[in-house]
Image: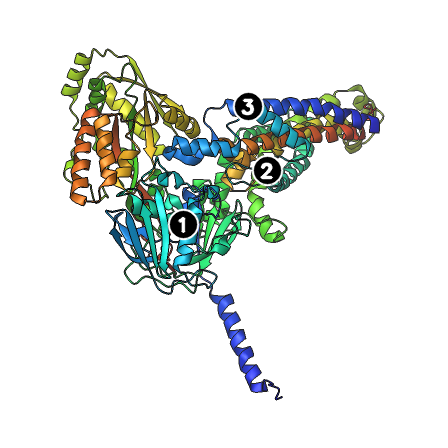
Amino acid sequence: MLGYLARRLAMTIPTLLLVAIAVFALVRLIPGDPVQVMLGDAADPAQAAELRAQLGLDQPIPVQFVHWIAKLATGDFGHSITNNLAVLPLILDRFQVSAVIVLVAVGLAACIAVPAGLAAAWKQNSLLDLSVVGGATLLLSIPSFWLGLLLLLLFGLKLKWLPVIGYVPFAENFWQAATFIVLPIVTLTMVEIGVLTRMARAASIEVLRLEYVTHARAKGVPEWRVLARHVLPNAFAPTWTLIGLVLGHLLGGIAVIETVFTLPGLGRLLVDSIFARDYPVVQGCLLFTAVIYVVVNLIVDLCYPLFDPRVAVA
Amino acid sequence: MRRCRPSPAWALGLAAVGLLAMLGKAGAETLLRTRLNADIRSTDPGTNRDANTDGVIGHVVEGLVAFREDTSIGPMLADSWTVSNEGKTYTFRLRQGVKFHNGATMTSDDVVWSLKRWLDPATQWRCLSEFSTTGIARIEKIEAPDPQTVAITLDQPTALFLPTLARPDCGQTAIIHRDSVGADGKWIAPIGTGPFKLAEWKRGQYVDIVRFDGYVSRSEPRTGYTGAKDAKVDRVRFNVIPDSSAAKAGLLSGSLDVIMSLSTPDLEGLKSQPEVQLSITPGLALTGILFQTRDPLLKDVRIRRAIALSIDTPQIVDAVMEGTARPNNSALPIGSPFYGEVQSHGYQQNLVEAKKLLVLAGYHGQPIKMITNKRYTYVFDSAMLVQAMAQAVGINIEIEVLDWATQLDRYNRGDYQSMAFTYSARLDPSLSFEMLTGPKASQPRKVWDNAEAQEMLRQSMMIDDRAKRQALFDEMHRRFIADVPMIVLFNNSELTALRKSIKGYAGWLYPQPRFWGVAVE
């Protein structure tokens, strides 16, 4: 187990290095640079050159890359060009916001989607199945920003139950913080229910057709026990993989929801930094997201044997 | 020795006063909540800055002089000044009894220290280059003959000295207390003289400024960045809210009091809201269509002129700005004191003449690429309308939409055929022309490369005589219209929405808010 872990972690190093190179190069391939964005239409060339030199942007790109990697190796992600904040604390600060929303939303979505998918598969082609599939497809097709804005309009403006803008960290005031993230969580949960229900249903249908399910039923095992004992654990494994992928994907990328609800999350930080061409922050965010992806998938793989005894981690 | 013991009655009185003070403080703090579309860059004026930074810091610090409502220069921390030595020495009399936020009284020593700090390259002041050999003038001497007097000597006379000192993007060349920086010269926080002091900056979330109780206001009425500055609210909170629909929702739900820099499509929804009032003020920023006069096709002035004659500027402005802005083909903004009868003459739509010019130029439908962006909807909309109108005389404009940073890059390199573009506000007519005029060989971003215009511009920066400057600007306008290096369409408006409970707010030519004189009822 430990050997497996060590090997998996070692394997991530080349992956991350490739990501680092790609990210560094791609960000610089986009036309425009942070100095121009900072100075706007009033960019005096001498002033721009001076600022570039201050920021080290006048050096050859390979030299800049080596500087960046050397600092990364010591855990220093550099400083933002636009506001001079240290990048790693900035990312961690923003990540907390995104992580709470994503973890709660995906958790809730899984709690609803897995039983719903199982029920739909159990009663395949019934009215229940039709409504679950229909509902999931509908949720999948709704753009999250639109759903978010509608919820804002209803609960923020019309009913005035929840605040419309702003964010309070949990450490400051738990209940107030909760009121700010209810709507983003609901929005994300609804979208993810759509994704996960379809997966849970498909996996359950496959398992329900297998011989050991027929065998169990033939033995006279009660139907609830067939579902709970034989179908659910086996059908959950592929859904679990999907949850891992979804988590990895969302932890760095709920920029749209963060923008609609004005939350200072990681996704918005990334988007804003791209528009401002804030290279160190863009690089930091993307690399951090890659690390999260790798770590989440590693955790998912390590948990796999818990659901599927046929898979052994060695 | 006699020991002094407070009597019980005395102690009781003291406690009562303390309690009252606490109650008063707890119950009555008035808060005004507004919005920034992005976080400020720093609290150091005129260095690591952008428009949001200038807007917040403009409440905290002040300079010797400041812009008035009509962009003329008025005294701020200076009481008056005289110009001597053939226009090269400015002697400022300082106002008496001006307090810094730490309670210290401002003297000429502080002014000299602040100015020397700005001129130190280590400060990285944005406007340092203005006072170098390539700028408007070099500062040769700064002296303080007495605690209320400061004399600044330049190496040559310039009409732009005071306007440059007052520029908001230069941090208004703020006079700050030396404790604003640490012993190592590093910036800590602004200890200024403004009507508000900086309270808290929660990065990515909000900036709070609170009323400075020791503020000594000027006596004349509020005008621009000077005049009376009476802080009527205890605290102003600038919330960082990038998304404009979220900001609008915040205003409607009552969690925001003021939102600035609205776009025209926002107005329609807000007009009908009973709890919202609007403030629409003409601005200084300028939107128009730039032409690359070195382009093989567009170097022919007849084609550029044909485009200018094919469009109906008033109609474009009406459609794009929905009645909030007036058409203007001049490089000078309508609000400028130098905008007169001459400047009001621009292009008249004339399709027959446009077609004739195209035939003469041998134009037969070659595509003309026009860059635009969606960051500024009015820029995008303007490009679309120009394209449609030019099509009517057979001009084939192809629109290319880029993100703002990419467009800026192309602009700075002069790498375009034409582009719809927006310039930020310039507070002096010379600067309005300076942003457009210059040799393309050394400054590719400049649109108007005309040697005679450059000479007139240079003169306008040197002489202080108003009539002579006006004559120069009039002549430059005529040539600008004849050369068609760009088509100016309009000056943007500053659109602000406020809750009805906000009293005393007024926009002005410069696109920055002022929260002194503003009350929450």
Distance in Å between CA atoms under marks 3 and 1: 37 Å
Please tell me how crowded label 3 is: few (under 14), some (14-19), or many (20+) other residues with Cα within 10 Å: few
| Chain letter, disc 3 residue | A
Please tell me how crowded label 2 is: few (under 14), some (14-19), or many (20+) other residues with Cα within 10 Å: many
Q: Relative to the observer, which residue lies in front, B472 or A150? A: B472
Q: Is residue A184 visible?
A: yes
Q: Quadrant of residue B428?
A: top left
- In the picture, the quarter occupied by the N terminus of chain A is top right
| Above or below: residue B145 compared with residue A78 | below
* Type of the residue with mark 2: Val
Circle number at residue B115? 1
Residue pointed to by mark 3: A61
* Type of the residue with mark 3: Ile
**Upstream in sequence: badge 3 or badge 2:** 3
Circle number at residue B270? none
Query: What's the image's color scheme?
Result: rainbow
Asked if residue B253 lies left or right of residue B399, the reply is: right
Circle number at residue A87? 2
Q: Do the residues under discs 3 and 2 have CB atoms within 8 angstroms?
A: no
Distance in Å between CA atoms under marks 1 and 2: 33 Å
Q: Do the residues at discs 3 and 2 belong to one chain?
A: yes
Residue A114: percent from left, percent from top: 69, 32
Q: Relative to the observer, which residue lies in front, B496 or A29? A: A29
Looking at the rendered structure, the number of numbered marks drawn on it comes to 3
* Type of the residue with mark 1: Leu
Q: Do the residues at discs 3 and 1 belong to one chain?
A: no
| Above or below: residue B382 compared with residue B212 | above
Q: Relative to the observer, which residue lies in front, B333 or B325? A: B333
| Above or below: residue A97 compared with residue B498 | above
| Chain letter, disc 2 residue | A
Residue B519: percent from left, percent from top: 37, 60
